[in-house]
Amino acid sequence: MYSLLNVLGLTIGISGFLMIVFFILDENNYDRFYSNADHVYRITSHWGTNGDAQYATAPPPLGVALTSGISEIKAVTRLLKWNDFTIQPETGLNAAQIFRETSVFYADPNFFEVFDFEIIEGNKESFAKGNGLAITETAARRYFGNVPLHEVMDKNLLIGSSATTPVRIAAILKDLPTQSHFHFDILVHQPSMHEEIFLMDNWTWNILHTYAVVQEGGESAVEAHLDRIVATEIVPRLTGDQQSTDFYFALQRVQDIHLDSHLLREHEVNGYRGYVNVFSAVAAIILLLASINFMNLSTAKGANRSMEVGVRKVMGSGKVQLIGQFLAEAFILVLLSTVVSLFLIQSLNGLFNEISGKQISFDLMQPSWIWISLPVLVLILTLMAGFYPAFYLSSFKPIKALRGTALSEKGSVGLRSGLVVFQFGISLVLMISALIVQEQLGFIQHTDLGFKRDQLLVIHNDGEVSNQEREDFKRRLSTNPMFQSASFSTGIPLPGSFHMRGFNLPESGTGQGMNWYEADEDFVTTLDLKLADGRNFSKIPGADRQKVLINERAAKVLGIADDAIGKTIIKNQGAEDEAKLEVVGVLRDFNFESLRTEIKPLVIEYMDDYFLRDYITVRVSAGNFAAAIEDLQQTWKQFEPRVPMNYTFLDQDFEAVYHSEIRMGKLMNVLTLISIFIALLGLFGLTAYSVQQRSKEIGIRKVFGAGTSELFLLLSGSYFKLIGIAVLIAVPTAYLLMAEWLGDFAFRVPLTPWVFLIGAMACFGLALLTVLFHSVKSIGTNPVHILKNE
């Protein structure tokens, strides 16, 4: 039985360890597949006196300035996510079908000199000629079906909703690797857009993701060059309240973006290095727990092998020879466990991807060092799990071993007790941590954000419903009982969906950077925002031009918290878009970014004539959502019959912001179950051994009248003392760790005693059931059968 428990514990431990290793490798391997990945950097922009506005983007003129007067920069390229695209193939099987593409970037012609994605058909020179597209293999199949890819080359895609423009396919790429911080289906190089945006002389509009190839050792020179650019190009252009604003550019290694970057205008939601470090530690701990099980069970069953050791020593076997024998036995068990775990993780690959939200293949051949390192892992585990038992068993004195008294020494018992405390302490820390993570995730999903996020459908409108058609669109929805209200706005309560502007009072020359977007008179009603003072925008179209709503935080920062209504604030004083705006209402603070950050100042300007991308937010009545979406699409087609409606649900978008936390919660649950299972497995084996060793004592005590409860306490008391010690150590440890983790959230759950109590009770309860299994069986045995041979 002990060998089976050892193999089972090691198999579970090794499997958990290997799966987390693959997860960690995946997280750490983002953006490492480029041939020059070590030398590619992104230039980020940092605004504000307190560094509040930190952008993953940079202004258009920086691209040209970067390559002027410096040899350390070998190439610069830029990306622009402008809006969604309406695309139709000019010929082919799907020529009649119109697609709404959301993953399209404009790019510089030299894009593939910096990012050498694999090109299947065509070449980078063809793309650089202009008016060309580079599309992925999946996109090519989507538009032209399963025709040979070389036949797709030089065909046209028609871009635009009404006046379509044919653009040729210049290159077909292999689908982008998952481990990239940005993904696209189509890349566009269009000279007209390049001239209009990429060559724009605007140093204060951070719109382009800008990347540079820096020669080895040239980082310091490039950073100094960026400082000179700020001094010569940015500072002289700062006017009015902008002059008191700090500004600088920073270099960011492209390989660090996925785990270390959480700026405004990121391409995608990134991971967190802290979570990867946590999983690294937990993976090592799980392997250690499995090794501890092996050590405990091997030393516990030493009494059964003491006679064997005594005989071998009498027959001339030395200590080194015995250690070698026991290590060989441990090696065989570890090797068997490793082989079984390799088959196990292959069978669990799909389930692990579902839990982790990854697309990982447990391929032991990729990278090659994994299968090379497996023998090393086996050897390390053999030494970790087998060395002490081998040393301990080989140390038995021959005379004591032959008399059966080799285990009278207390050293091994003390070590086993300490290891049991460690196992249950670690398991309890993980259990409490998992409970708190789930509690925080529940808080994120259900807390009052200051607006009602459920039943809100958001349409991404790229001018399909024009400014002149807004009121007509809303009027048609208002006649349908499936919709409660609808609103147009240039931002929604999600990170990165708003802009920054400087605001100040007329008597103050110092501006404060604030979040800003425009919205119509139905925005407050549709989101169910609450007014603290004043009124909403007027229902009369155009009546509230140059009027604003501000939140309580903005009123406080501007110094008008007690008397904001009717006050005039200046937007971007001294700039071309300077405007004097009147405050007509103060909104209760609501979370429009992330629960990780405090609520920031927000200014909502009345939406009058906006020509860029905006959002249509529709509150859908409870009931048949599928029917409501169908009705909404029919209404959409009345305004734009060619372009498919692109929509999302705000609550799902909000949850996507916490993708890393949700994934962490799921993995923590799995790792906690693994650690608890391993700890209970060890306790199961130790209890079985203890009951076996004390069976005669139990029989004698029963003969002398000992009751069931007395015998149960005799068998289990020592283990519950150890678990009690583990609880005393684990609770403050878990408190400190989770207090630090929750400290990353401005809005968080309190650390209440109930969570720790539930964890401790669960730990005691599981241990009780484990001990009870063997104890009841032993206590219920007739003492006559136990003592009949005495």
Image (tube, grey):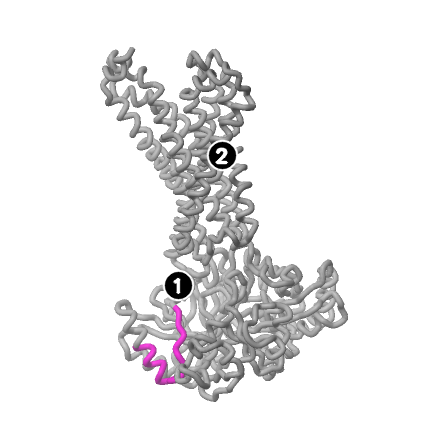
In the image, 562 versus 473, the foreground residue is 473
Which residue is at 42% across, 78% downward? 99
Tag 2, which secondary structure?
A: helix
Q: Which residue is mark 2?
A: 331
Furthest residue toward front: 315
Number of residues whose C-alpha sits closer than 10 Å to that of mark 1, classed few (under 14), some (14–19) or many (20 or more): some
Q: Which residue is mark 1?
A: 652
Image side of residue 410 versus residue 230, left or right? left
Residue 240: % across, % down: 65, 72
The answer to which of 726 and 394 lies nearer the viewer is: 394
Q: Nearer the viewer, residue 188 or 693?
A: 693
Measure the C-alpha gap from mark 1 to mark 2. Answer: 49 Å
Q: Is residue 634 magenta?
A: yes
Viewer-proximal residue among 717 and 748: 717
Q: Which mark is residue 270?
A: none
What are the residue bounds of the magenta stretch?
631-648
The N terminus lies in which quarter of the figure?
top left
Q: Quadrant of residue 131?
A: bottom right
Residue 563 pos. (x, y %) = 49, 66
Q: Is residue 496 above or below residue 417?
A: below
Query: Compared with residue 327, is residue 753 higher up or lower down, i.e. above or below?
Result: below
Mark 1 falls on what kind of element? helix
Q: Would residue 293 be found to the left or right of residue 61 on screen?
A: left
Residue 620: quarter of image: bottom left
